[in-house]
Amino acid sequence: MQDLLAGLNEAQRLAVTTISGPVLTLAGPGSGKTRVLTHRIAHLLQQGIAASEILAVTFTNKAAREMRERMQHLVGVDVATKVDIGTFHSLAARWLRRDGRAIGLADGWLIYDDDDQQRLIKRVSKELKLPDKPFTPRAISSAISSAKNELLDAAAYTAASRSPEGRMYAAAYTRYSELLTVAAAVDFDDLLLLTLDLFRTPMLNRYHRRYRYILVDEYQDTNRAQYEMIKALAKGSGNIFVVGDDDQSIYGWRGADVRNIRRFESDFAGAQVIILAENYRSTQTILDVAQVLIDAAPKRIHRKLLRGQTPGGEPVSWREYSDQNEESQRVCDAIEGLVKKGVARYADCAIMYRTNAQSRAFEEALSRRRIPYVVIGGMRFYERREIKDVLAWLRLLSNPNDDISLVRAIEFPAQGIGVGSIAHLSEWASSHGVSLYQALIDAAADSTAVPALRGAARQRMMTFGARLYGLVKRAPSLTLLDAFDEMLRESQFVAGLVNEHGGVDAESRVENVNELRRVAGEYAELPVDEQLARFLEEVALVADVDRLAAVDNHVVCITLHQAKGLEYDNVFLVGLEDELIPHSRTHNDPVQIEEERRILYVGVTRARKRLALSRTLRRMNFGRYDQTLSSRFLADIPKGLLAHATNLGTVNPSAGQGRSNPAFQGWGTAAAHKPTTVAVQYAVGDMVRHQRFGEGVVLSAKSVDDDVEVVVRFADPAAGEKRLIASFARLEKVTTPN
């Protein structure tokens, strides 16, 4: 066996060799935690510990696979396979297969996946006659999963439910559990709950004897059930080693509780804390930005001073752009500049954003430039189901004889029209040589047309046909945005998304629909009769480019959540605005606000060599531009750490480049764009009027390149205090009578 300590720094060696008692290893980004975990296991084996006495728990199958592969390299295949390495769920399933009879679990039980679970919940909803709102299958499954993560079975959840809505969810949970029992099935959450049940029996002693050394990766991401599992196992030998970083806890929305890692020292008396702060990924300039960003967070258990192996490095760049289209174009300029200079491949570049909907502008810009790209962890914008469904409805307004789009429109939002009814309509249309739309018109005018459609099925089809007919007739006189809105209203599209998906999933899909509507708003300057056709044509061209064969060398587009655990030479963190990060839905919750800070910290620490931060000064929403504010987190970054900008985006005059400079310094080659000069001057105390926010008083005004940044407190409490760029805000001075 090789020298396991060779090449390890002092903190890593301590983490590898401290084998007795509870150990909390706080591993900063890029600090080599996987290497520590695998070398620690190998060291345990060198000390004569049997492989079968070691348990290593990870969060993903990929992490477990990587750990096992590294172990095989260190100690050989035969020894590595004897160490129990797996995810919480895979290990729980293995233990329940072996010992589940101790808690009454029948032999041959099944694991229901998400699709099985949704089908069962739909059956429950039908049996209980639950109203569609708010009891969508997704909402019900989310409520059940949340209850299980808090260790509440159906009886406990029922006892805790006080409101009528809560009792209906409890009834669904109870019936769902009964049907799972009848089917001899468990869901993923049950795997953890049942394992805890197993650990409440004398069988736990067997696991204490078996696993004398326990290692847990990403401890900051554990939920309540996982936390209790580890505590129960560790009560045996007390040799519990966890690796994590409270600064990188970003999955609270799916049940992770950052308090678990923060109370490790109180849970396990005498715990030793080891801090891995040596960073092997990023330059020091990038780490300095990450450091000040996370140092502003409250409630951290131990401060980690991030030290890089690469001193100095290129400055972190900060830019503000007029809107998301300019931002996406200039990011493309920078990427092309890096590639043309030969300092990077496309695959070395990543564009990171807070929400999936933000990818649209970048996908279009990359497609137009013929820059190969891939969207990680999700479908490309125009391939997403909700976007295809909206486009199907809009295509029908342009050409109602598009049979493919018509079938898609029938299927979503759900019209209560089954595949049999669609088949009857299609057969009749085919035999008479007409489109499905014409068949609908014929059936409405003549009761003998499409005779196979009868009763309630015919009525539902006629209702759909009448709704579509009205939209098609009104469309030529409507602007694209008006047609878009009428389509959403008449089809009840948003309600359909909520009914089918519910919760955060529906919210994300609605955001995507709103993003498509923003694209439609860009066609408002065209003649009304050209808007819809031009929009559909250009969207189709983007979609065609999207279908180009994938290549290995491509730019990565990825959300900040999905980027955790990844790293790239060149990272563009875009859309750093206060409605996006922190996300608007977190603004009233200090706990969620701090998780948003950690999300941004994770993004910053993905960069190896170059990091560019940017935001837009205005963002199109519902067909109009709204002013934006910089993310509040940027105020914590001193101006000296960002190239050519202060912490609030004010230009550093010595840089010689304006806030609308289209390329990141040293990255691209595009010529600078000069913003509109503002003639109107503002002074503290001036009364002004904004088209959207109404009247307000100027609190401050300062020059920002050829523009003016004005802070205004508006009389409307809903508007509050806004920081505006004068050339975009178009503020009017209000003359007050003497």
Image: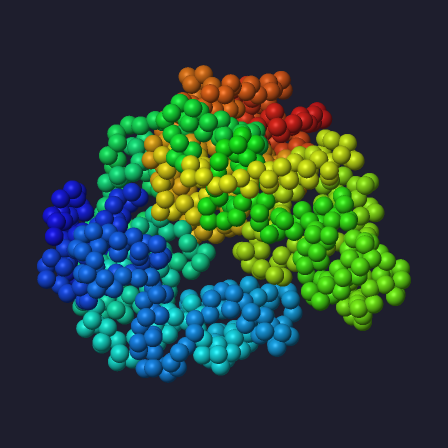
Q: Residue at x 38, y 81 (%)?
A: 107
Residue 381 in view, yes or no:
yes
Q: Residue at x 62, y 48 (%)?
A: 387
Q: Residue 103, located in which quarter of the rendered image?
A: bottom left
Work out whether 470 lies above or below 734: below
Residue 593 in view, yes or no:
no
* Residue 319 pos. (x, y %): 47, 28
Q: Residue 454, located in which quarter of the rendered image?
A: bottom right
Q: In the image, 638: left or right of 464? A: left
Color scheme of the displayed model: rainbow
Between 285 and 46, the one lying in front of the other is 46
Q: Residue furthest right?
A: 446
* Residue 665 pos. (x, y %): 42, 23
Q: In the image, 586: left or right of 298? A: right
* Residue 642 pos. (x, y %): 39, 28
Between 589 and 381, the one lying in front of the other is 381
Between 689 and 533, the one lying in front of the other is 533
Work out whether 179 lies above or below 83: below
Q: In the image, 389: left or right of 141? A: right
Work out whether 163 lies above or below 702: below
Q: Residue at x 61, y 77 (%)?
A: 127
Q: Residue at x 53, y 56 (%)?
A: 504
Question: Exactly how many numbered labels are in the figure?
Answer: 0
Q: Quadrant of the C terminus?
A: top right
* Residue 705 pos. (x, y %): 51, 20
